[in-house]
Image (spheres, helix red, strand yellow):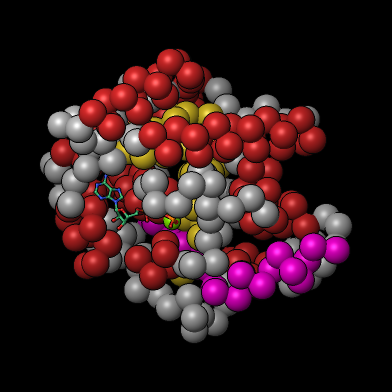
Amino acid sequence: MHVWAVANQKGGVGKTTSTVCLAGLLGEQGHKVLMVDLDPHGSLTSYFKYDPDDINLSVYDLFMHEGKVPEDLPKDIIVPTCQPGVDLFPASTALATLERKVATQGGMGLVISKSLATLWDQYQYVIIDTPPILGVLMINALAAAQKLLIPVQTEYLAVKGLERMTHTLSMVMQSTKKQLPFTIIPTLYDRRTHASLNALKKIRELYGEQVFAECIPVDTRFRDASESGEMPSQSDPDGRGVRVYRHLLNALLKTASAA
Ligand SMILES: Nc1ncnc2c1ncn2[C@@H]1O[C@H](COP(=O)(O)OP(=O)(O)OP(=O)(O)O)[C@@H](O)[C@H]1O
Ligand SMILES: [Mg+2]
């Protein structure tokens, strides 16, 4: 099982879109894939037409057992998506209360790792979508992941946000004594604007090899796909955005098989 987390403390940079698109493409290749929605807003959950305000079982339930995870609970939480072979751990808006509830309990950082361990032979790839805040959910994602994907919108303020994210990552790596390789994915790129060109140049200067060689372009088809609830790889397989995600996936799979 390969576990990737998609994270950036800045909102609206393409985390959920990257999760859906990569999961769809992996599914298309015949892999069994699990997406995990750790965002209390539940955008990923809503994408597949489940209601995070009214969901029976969700990742929230995994956190309700004082850091232990009942053996059968993770598999009971799984719901299917529109694509066979691609499943989802849905979020519930109750996740927003988690921080307050579990702040004083120890051992809450490994709940997702423990849950995934019970599904080890059922999925080849797990992609975790995270909220744009540093808290117990982000810590769980970083602890469970073997690789971090950081989408970054190609604009000035996003570059600042990226510095915050990589700082968070190095703090977490120090405290967990775990190395977590990361790939930065430039997103929402518009080559007609100076803001995009300048931001991309800066990101490459700062992070060199850790930046994916291409940029995900602005492509309104992603918004259309999210409305219809289809995977972008299904609704627009040859679209310019999906094409770059396909290249990204190939690059990630190469490093995953080398690891
Ligand atoms: N490459 C793109 N081109 C055009 N629109 C995009 C692209 N990527 C994402 N979007 C749109 O931008 C909005 C934000 O994207 P997304 O939800 O993936 O970001 P996010 O980082 O998950 O946001 P949040 O931090 O709020 O969870 C969505 O409406 C999405 O459809
Ligand atoms: Mg999101």
Residue 203 vertical placement versus 26 (above, below): above
Residue 165 vertical placement versus 14 (above, below): above
Q: Position of residue 13 (x, y in %)?
A: 39, 46
Q: Position of residue 233 (x, y in %)?
A: 23, 49
Range covered by the magenta-colored residues:
85-104
Q: Relative to the observer, which residue lies in front, 124 or 239? A: 239
Q: Relative to the observer, which residue lies in front, 17 or 230? A: 17
Residue 187 vertical placement versus 86 (above, below): above
Q: Position of residue 192 (x, y in %)?
A: 15, 31
- Does the magenta portion include 15? no
Q: Is residue 232 left or right of residue 133?
A: left
Residue 249, can we see it? no
Q: Quadrant of ligand 2?
A: bottom left
Q: Relative to the observer, which residue lies in front, 239 or 77? A: 239
Image quarter of residue 248: top left
Where does the C terminus fall, quadrant-wise? top right
